[in-house]
Amino acid sequence: MELVPTITFPEARARVIHQVTLGRSLPVTELVDLPAACGRVIAQSIYADRDYPTLDRSVRDGFAVRSPDVPGRLKVIGEVRAGEMFNGTVHAGEAVEIMTGAPIPEGADAVVMIEHVVRQGEWIVYDKLAPSGQFVSPKGEELLSGAELCGPGKRLDYTDIALLASVGCSAVHVYAKPRVAIIATGDEIVAIDDPAAAAYQIRNSNAYSLAAQVRRAGGVPEVLAVAKDDRDDTRGLIDRGLASDLLILSGGVSAGKYDIVESVLSGFGAEFYFDRVAIQPGQPAVFGRAREKFVFGLPGNPASTMVTFEIFARAALDLLAGATESRLPVALGRLTREFRHKTGLTRFLPATLSECGSLTPVAWKGSSDMAALARANTFLMADADREQWNAGDIMPVLMK
């Protein structure tokens, strides 16, 4: 097995995106109702069916007027609400009471706010100028008929659903969700409901966390049996896992005597793009390809498994789902206290980020401390080349 040099976090993530983009085949498509399309990757282009707004409309409650008539005293000749048209024309010295969203009556070219007029029976008095177009959203200002709203490869969110609904799109073609095989490895791993779990055994939490992460990222998790520290057993399960669109293993990728995942993958003719990344947690992370399927070997400690999925495997899953890009959900926080670390590794450590942006590291006991991970709502991202941050410094965070 040829050794792959340790690479940095940015290099590793770029390598995942590059290799998967080059080597993927787009999934088949399926037609789903619009409400079911949220979170899915669209496989078609959608175009505006008409101009939006379809008519000049008011963006305030008030009165539609002719701009040359104000300031002045105007006669109110009617009212128009959203969802109806005014049957008539506004002539010199006249105004029409208008509600937000209602079409601008013929003859009017501006709106004055109701709060700024004095009502005198069927008359109003307005003592300011109202330039043509004031508080008017003109026809086609937002979209022109035929404009592309979204195209293949975009993951739809709730704003996209609203936009597609507004143009009368009730169903869309989306890419099928990738199937992701998950294999936890290690003789010490037992089922979570095993009543005879001994003190030296570990319940299979990684398979559950990975399945949850896969499902949240838009994939379909397929949890296989635990692979024992045995070549034949591991080989058989990897063989099954390679039938899926993506294979993820946890554990068995470090340098120990029974860390056999890489060597077993080599027996399938695997090509490795990296097998060690300068990060913590998750340094011995593996990414490769076997039988034309991409494979991740993630370190077995829970934090290592979770973090390396989010920063590497999730990007691959996005692209295999048909998305044109994958972005890390990174925010910024202001440290509440000093933070130090040893340079050389990019670190992803549990922290809490408040609504006002205050960032506080969470005390933890290492990569197996799941209680600390659950108390955190983010991971602070400590740059490999910087040793110290002071209270008040801004720091990037990876959102959970």
Image (cartoon, grey):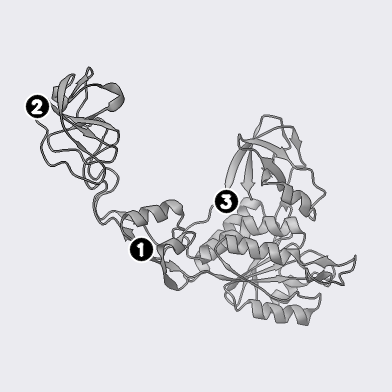
Residue at 70% over, 61% down:
285
Residue 257 visible in the picture: yes
Q: Which residue is mark 3?
A: 328
Amino acid type at image mark 2: Ala
Residue 247 position (above or below residue 278): below
Would you identify the image quadrant in which residue 29 lies?
bottom left
> Disc 1 to disc 2, how far (Cα)?
45 Å
> Is 250 in front, or is 156?
156
> At label 1, which amino acid type do we have?
Ser
Kind of residue indicated by mark 3: Leu
Q: Position of residue 108 (x, y in %)?
A: 15, 33
Which residue matches tag 2?
A: 92
Mark 1 vs mark 3, CA separation in Å: 30 Å
Q: Nearer the viewer, mark 1 or mark 3?
A: 1
Return the residue nearer the eye: 101 or 361.
Answer: 101
Relative placement, left or right, of 287 versus 80 is: right
Q: Within 10 Å of the Cα at label 1, are there few (<14), some (14-19), or many (20+) other Cα atoms?
A: few
Which residue matches tag 1? 170
The tag earlier along the polypeptide, 1 or 3, is 1
Query: How far is the residue under mark 3 from the one under mark 2?
Result: 58 Å
The residue at the point 26 percent across, 43 percent down is 82
| Depth check, front residue: 61 or 160 | 61
